[in-house]
Amino acid sequence: MDISVLHNSILFKGFDDTEISELLKALNAAEKKYKKGTMIFSSGEITDKLCFVTAGSVTVESNDMWGNRTILNLVGEGQFFAESYALLPDVPMLVDVCAAVDCTVVFLSMKSLADLNDTIRARLLANLLTITTRKNLHLSSRSFHTAPRQVRGRIMAYLNTESVQKHSREFDIHFDRQQLADYLNVERSVLSNELSKMQRDGLIRCRKNHFEII
């Protein structure tokens, strides 16, 4: 397991390599590799594992019984998922988690938090609070992106957020076309058609996942 990747994560901020190694043992860390498309968690499952992506990316999705998919989040290298469920292990998951590409995930057992000394536990929980707060902000952003009724409004809201976060009118996004369509809760063909119209109208330039707001 590559300690350097963990060292740069929010969860282990302020911990040195020795402390991280000790925490990994205390939290029964387990590393697993997944092929693209593999389901990591399914809705209805219960877990006490906080999950850290060390390579690749995963999608957090809502899939209904009629086959409709909504992407709630794309979790990339250095990011966490399932933190809320890990701290509430009696609550069934309401989402699916799937490998977006070949990926590696480290699982940390939150049941073992009680076994840590008070100082270490307090530092770890403070970092975990930062993670959950950022995740809540991200989910709030998605509500802004899907609030407009028109597809163009959703695209513009999403691109505006990306531009603000990256301090540039030109940037790459993490989603491919299908993932972006699922995230914005629109059909892919409708999304592609609207992007073409926006380019003709002189609002944007785009190629694959690269965008420029004009």
Image (spheres, rainbow, N blue to C red):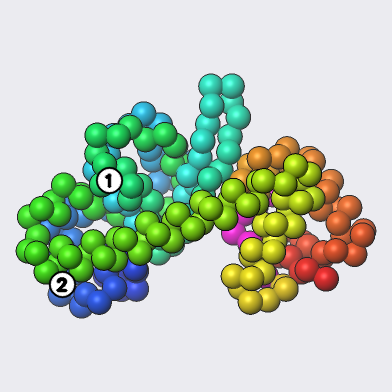
Q: Crowding near pointer 2: few (<14 within 10 Å), some, many (20+)?
A: some
Quarter of the image that includes the C terminus: bottom right
Task: Left or right? Give the position of 185 relative to 57.
Answer: right
Q: Position of residue 39 (x, y in %)?
A: 43, 37
To which residue does mark 1 refer? Answer: 86
Q: Is residue 56 visible?
A: no
Mark 1 and mark 2 residues within 8 Å of each other at the beta carbon = no
| Magenta region | 171-177
Quarter of the image that includes the N terminus: bottom left
As for residue 173 lying within the magenta part, the answer is yes
Q: Residue at x 66, y 40 (%)?
A: 185
Q: In the image shown, does 147 or 21 lie closer to the viewer?
A: 147
Q: Residue at x 31, y 43 (%)?
A: 85
Total marks shown come to 2
As for residue 205 lying within the magenta part, the answer is no
Q: Which mark is residue 19?
A: 2
Q: Is residue 76 above or below residue 68?
A: below
Q: Nearer the viewer, mark 1 or mark 2?
A: 1
The kind of secondary structure element at disc 1 is helix
Task: Left or right? Give the position of 56 relative to 208.
Answer: left
Q: Position of residue 143 (x, y in %)?
A: 59, 48
Q: Is residue 142 visible?
A: yes
Which of disc 2 and disc 1 is earlier in sequence? 2
The kind of secondary structure element at disc 2 is helix
Q: Residue furthest top?
A: 66
Q: Position of residue 127 (x, y in %)?
A: 29, 66
Q: Is residue 111 above or below residue 56?
A: above
